[in-house]
């Protein structure tokens, strides 16, 4: 075993770029561990927790590179992959245009001064460092999208209050998805262009917004904007501060003829406040507020279509579920909202479902089940895991970029004789893994083949035909590997629950 530890000063990349660089190094031949990150306290602790002897005295302004491999040849391959990924990132920055070929601004204020026509600042810095940068952007009169997670709630409230006073919008923190005037930010699907005013979306839910807009896109409905407000915005503490502002902004937007607000299960009092605010707008508003007994995202999309006088299509499927007996459902999700929806739908059929993002506190996974960052789920009954939750993405890329943990849990589920159906999501679009089926299909085929019993796999495929991964190609590859594939996450969850319950006719 060989290791490489390197610190580079005066180098900075945003967290998304660093995730991709880390993944490139990790995929080099013979590399077992790789972390490329700014040397924040958290990242240093993670590296030391992985067994690397990180030197003392480094600061969050330093880039920390740690590699572990089978031998020195593997380390050399890892370093080469790292250097190539860095060069690609720098080249992408140069060809992206934006600030041009002049000196790179070293602060938000300098960037704002350099581009007085830019109305929005996207921040992707360590969460604890967001406050000052975002206040600078707000002070410069710019809307702000905060991609960063692990931002303290008190900072989020302070930022959103400052934004309200300044007349701008804060999207996030932990806002991974937005589309502003047709430009996708973060994880974003490629939606068709349409003439006339479209549907504007306010989303306290990233993958929920992706699922909704992909279904509407399938039905031929245009989308004006998707304004993400962060998954905590409709919590009791934050009180829907950004959602209320985003609703007013879309109400004043001539490109928006209808508004949809979508959220993970909100706090009841905040849901009432947002509902009352929506009723005062001149633009019609539809609410998709997930919760027990409430409509699914697919139901919400259908309601919007009926309101628009459109026909509700049959949501696409590719291959029926394989035959399998009753047993345990194992849900493995990259999207938190899709995981929430799957639990709500499947739970109505199966009863209690445990999770790391439980619908009720008593359904939380035992602490021992999530030790060492890899959930151990055998013997826990029906379980749905959000692999994109903060606790499972510390020190590793988001599962929409790197499916490594999901693949490990698929193999574990297939080896567990209690499990009769594996339910998982695949999310397409810019920012997501470039070819998820190429990695997933062989693992599914091998895992199901080695299970030694009937085992069904159901995939919720969120994307559009125009996405760079090619939805049809992805669906066909997953179906060829034996998975039943659904464009509707709710329908996928319903099919998986029917299999786990042993319903006749669930499998064909």
Image: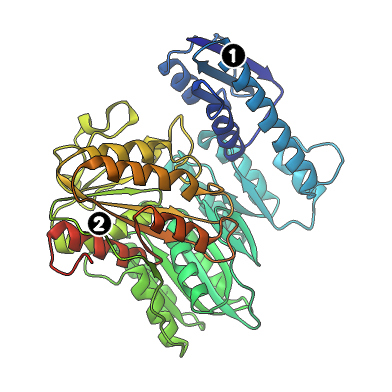
Q: In the rendered view, would you say 141 is above or below 76? A: below
Pick whichever, 319 or 219, lies toward us. Answer: 319
Image-quadrant location for residue 102 = top right
Q: Which mark is residue 343?
A: 2
Residue drawn at (79%, 58%) of the image: 117
Residue 246 visible? The answer is yes
Q: Secondary structure at mark 2?
A: helix
Image quadrant in which the C terminus is located: bottom left
Residue 487 position in % (x across, y down):
41, 66
**Quick check: 44 left or right of 60?**
left
Residue drawn at (35%, 63%) of the image: 489
Image-quadrant location for residue 488 = bottom left
Residue 479 position in % (x across, y down):
39, 58
Pick whichever, 112 or 193, lies toward us. Answer: 193
Q: In the rendered view, would you say 45 is above or below 354? A: above
Residue 469 position in % (x across, y down):
56, 55
Q: Are marks 2 and 1 in contact (CB under 8 Å)?
A: no
Q: Which residue is mark 1?
A: 73
Residue 275 visible? The answer is no
**Separation (CA) of disc 2 from disc 1:** 46 Å
Name the mark nearer the viewer: 2 or 1. Answer: 1
**Quick check: 299 left or right of 429?**
left
Residue drawn at (80%, 51%) of the image: 115
Q: Earlier in the sequence, mark 2 or mark 1?
A: 1
């Amino acid at each position: 075993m060989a290791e490489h530890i390197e610190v580079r000063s005066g180098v900075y990349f945003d967290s998304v770029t660093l995730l991709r660089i880390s993944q490139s190094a990790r995929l080099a031949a013979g590399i077992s561990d790789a972390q490329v990150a700014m040397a924040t306290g958290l990242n240093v602790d993670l590296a030391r927790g992985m067994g690397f002897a990180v030197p003392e005295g480094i600061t969050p302004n330093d880039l920390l590179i740690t590699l572990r491999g089978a031998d020195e040849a593997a380390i050399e391959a890892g370093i080469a992959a790292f250097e190539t990924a860095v060069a690609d990132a720098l080249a992408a920055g140069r060809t992206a245009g934006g600030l041009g070929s002049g000196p790179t601004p070293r602060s938000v204020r300098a960037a704002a001064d350099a581009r007085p026509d830019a109305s929005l600042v996207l921040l992707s810095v360590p969460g604890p460092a967001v406050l000052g940068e975002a206040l600078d952007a707000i002070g410069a009169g710019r809307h702000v999208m905060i991609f960063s997670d692990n931002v303290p709630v008190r900072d989020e409230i302070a930022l959103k209050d400052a934004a309200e006073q300044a007349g701008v919008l804060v999207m996030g923190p932990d806002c991974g998805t937005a589309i502003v005037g047709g430009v996708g930010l973060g994880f974003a699907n490629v939606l068709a262009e349409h003439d006339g005013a479209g549907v504007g979306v306010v989303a306290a839910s990233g993958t929920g917004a992706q699922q909704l807009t992909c279904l509407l896109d399938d039905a031929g409905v245009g989308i004006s904007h998707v304004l993400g407000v962060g998954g905590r915005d409709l919590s009791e503490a934050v009180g829907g501060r950004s959602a209320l502002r985003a609703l007013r902004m879309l109400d004043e937007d001539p490109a928006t003829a209808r508004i949809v607000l979508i959220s993970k299960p909100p706090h009841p009092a905040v849901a009432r406040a947002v509902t009352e605010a929506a009723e005062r707008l001149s633009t019609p508003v539809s609410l998709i507020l997930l919760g027990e007994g409430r409509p699914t995202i697919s139901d919400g999309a259908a309601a919007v279509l009926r309101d628009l006088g459109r026909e509700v299509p049959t949501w696409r499927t590719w291959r029926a579920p394989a035959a399998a007996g009753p047993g345990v459902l194992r849900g493995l999700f990259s999207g938190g909202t899709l995981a929430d929806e799957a639990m709500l739908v499947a739970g109505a059929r199966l009863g209690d479902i445990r999770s790391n993002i439980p619908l009720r506190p008593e359904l939380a996974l035992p602490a021992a089940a999530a030790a060492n960052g890899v959930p151990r789920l055998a013997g826990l009954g029906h379980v749905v895991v959000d692999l994109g939750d903060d606790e499972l993405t510390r020190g590793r890329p988001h599962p929409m970029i790197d499916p490594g943990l999901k693949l490990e849990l698929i193999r574990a589920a297939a080896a567990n004789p209690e499990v009769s159906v594996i339910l998982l999501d695949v999310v397409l679009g810019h920012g997501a893994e470039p070819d998820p089926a190429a990695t997933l299909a062989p693992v599914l085929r091998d895992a199901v083949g080695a299970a030694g019993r009937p085992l069904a796999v159901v995939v919720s495929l969120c994307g559009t035909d125009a996405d760079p991964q090619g939805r049809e190609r992805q669906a066909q590859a997953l179906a060829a590997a034996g998975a039943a594939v659904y464009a509707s996450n709710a329908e996928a969850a319903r099919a998986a629950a029917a299999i786990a319950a042993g319903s006749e006719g669930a499998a064909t």
